[in-house]
Image (cartoon, rainbow, N blue to C red):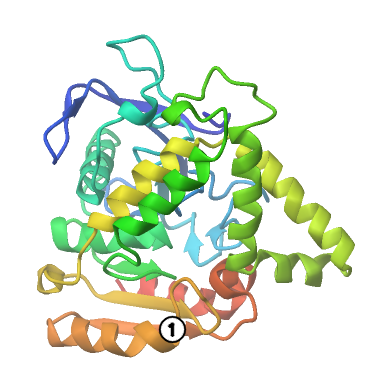
């Protein structure tokens, strides 16, 4: 679903890495701040697996506390660009988009894509916007995959990299794709993924909402809502509302397409390609990307590969959501890192 705050950019005859093509590819994107005369003050921001390009501009923006005048990504200094990745469901070309060849949604017939495809499409958007070298690429969660991918695929395009709550290779193999497919296959309205003509308020959408609630619990959102609202009942109600609201906008097939791309992702083996200084950020309570498991081997590998890498660990009870909920605990490090480039 295209957000009212987003703009569209169209790429004709976009060839995909695995052999197929999309004609056209559309990217939905948002910008904050102003591109300078030298066209070198842009920050490319990459969103998470199930998120969207609305990162700032109001309190609905998922990182609004980090983007704006005087904030870590200072819009009086930087031009921040956030695009919805291809394969997603917030305006960019994905499985719910209409296939020009059939006049119906691609659905399960959407071609397999890779993180390199996503990065290449973003690069064409940057060219369209007149952006030269980026001040930085910053990405959260799945967006951190893209941040690492940028670093190894186009190492001269940026002066800094900030992957947040993420890793430089996939967490989970093909079985993680099968789990999603099996989950939705239980729904009578799934129809092999061609579910778009089904009842909007039930079936697949209801299962999406249920899955979303469990995902948010795993991210630490329930704890954050409890602290904000003060009671289990209010927190549960708010969590379930978030699940319903999101499921009305997202696409189950996008979960599969993006997960397939994540399984193929590997920026570990060619880490030596990275030229830009890198700030790696993890949360000490994140179950998705646990700092205790990932920080030491990742930093050791990056430095052994010749990467100028620094590390920040957020001490927070909010798990995967720590960079958002406890933004003030790492915003100074982010601001200082960016200003030094």
Classify residue 16 by image quadrant: top left
| Callout 1 secondary element | helix
Question: Front-most of 264 and 130?
Answer: 264
Question: Front-most of 8 and 15?
Answer: 15
Residue highlighted by disc 1:
291
Question: Front-most of 189 and 229?
Answer: 189
The quadrant in which the C terminus is found is bottom left
Question: Front-most of 317 and 253?
Answer: 253
Give x and y (percent) for residue 12. 21, 21
Give x and y (percent) for residue 23. 23, 20
Going 39% across and 69% down the picture, which residue do you hit? 166
Horizontal side of 265 relative to 33 (left or right) equals left
Classify residue 334 by image quadrant: bottom left
Horizontal side of 192 relative to 2 (left or right) equals left
Give x and y (percent) for residue 325. 64, 69
Horizontal side of 324 relative to 157 (left or right) equals right
Q: Residues within 10 Å of mark 1 (few under 14, many from 20)?
A: many
Going 36% across and 62% down the picture, which residue do you hit? 144
Give x and y (percent) for residue 79. 40, 50
Above/below status of 146 relative to 331: above
Going 32% across and 90% down the picture, which residue do you hit? 296
Above/below status of 233 relative to 54: below
Horizontal side of 170 relative to 322 (left or right) equals left
Going 40% across and 13% down the picture, which residue do you hit? 104
Residue 93 visible? The answer is no
Residue 64 visible? The answer is yes
Q: Count up the numbered dots.
A: 1
């Amino acid at each position: 679903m295209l957000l009212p705050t987003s703009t569209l950019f169209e790429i004709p005859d976009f060839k995909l890495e695995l052999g197929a093509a999309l004609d056209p590819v559309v990217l939905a994107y948002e910008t904050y701040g102003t591109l300078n005369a030298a066209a070198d003050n842009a920050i490319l921001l990459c969103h998470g697996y199930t998120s969207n390009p609305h990162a700032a501009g109001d309190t609905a923006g998922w990182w609004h506390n980090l983007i704006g005048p005087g904030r870590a990504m200072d819009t009086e200094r930087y031009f921040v660009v956030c695009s919805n990745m291809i394969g997603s469901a917030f305006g960019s070309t994905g499985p719910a988009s209409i296939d020009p060849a059939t006049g119906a949604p691609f659905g399960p017939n959407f071609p397999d894509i890779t993180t390199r495809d996503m990065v290449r499409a973003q690069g064409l958007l940057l060219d369209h916007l007149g952006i030269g070298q980026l001040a930085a690429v910053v990405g959260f969660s799945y967006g951190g995959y893209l941040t690492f991918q940028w670093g190894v695929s186009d190492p001269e395009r940026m002066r800094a990299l900030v992957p947040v709550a993420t890793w430089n290779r996939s967490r989970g193999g093909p079985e993680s794709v099968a789990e999603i497919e099996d989950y939705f296959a239980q729904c009578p309205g799934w129809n092999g993924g061609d579910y778009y003509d089904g009842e909007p308020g039930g079936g697949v959408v209801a299962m999406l909402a249920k899955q979303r609630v469990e995902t948010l619990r795993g991210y630490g959102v329930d704890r954050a809502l409890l602290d904000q609202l003060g009671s289990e009942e209010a927190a549960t109600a708010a969590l379930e509302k978030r699940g319903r609201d999101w499921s009305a906008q997202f696409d189950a097939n996008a979960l599969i397409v993006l997960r397939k791309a994540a399984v193929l992702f590997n920026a570990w083996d060619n880490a030596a390609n990275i030229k830009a200084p890198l700030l790696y950020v993890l949360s000490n309570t994140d179950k998705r990307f646990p700092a205790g498991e990932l920080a030491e081997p990742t930093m050791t590998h990056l430095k052994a590969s010749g990467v100028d890498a620094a590390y920040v660990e957020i001490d927070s009870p909010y798990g995967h959501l720590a960079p958002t909920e406890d933004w003030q605990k790492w915003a100074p490090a982010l601001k200082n890192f960016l200003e030094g480039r």
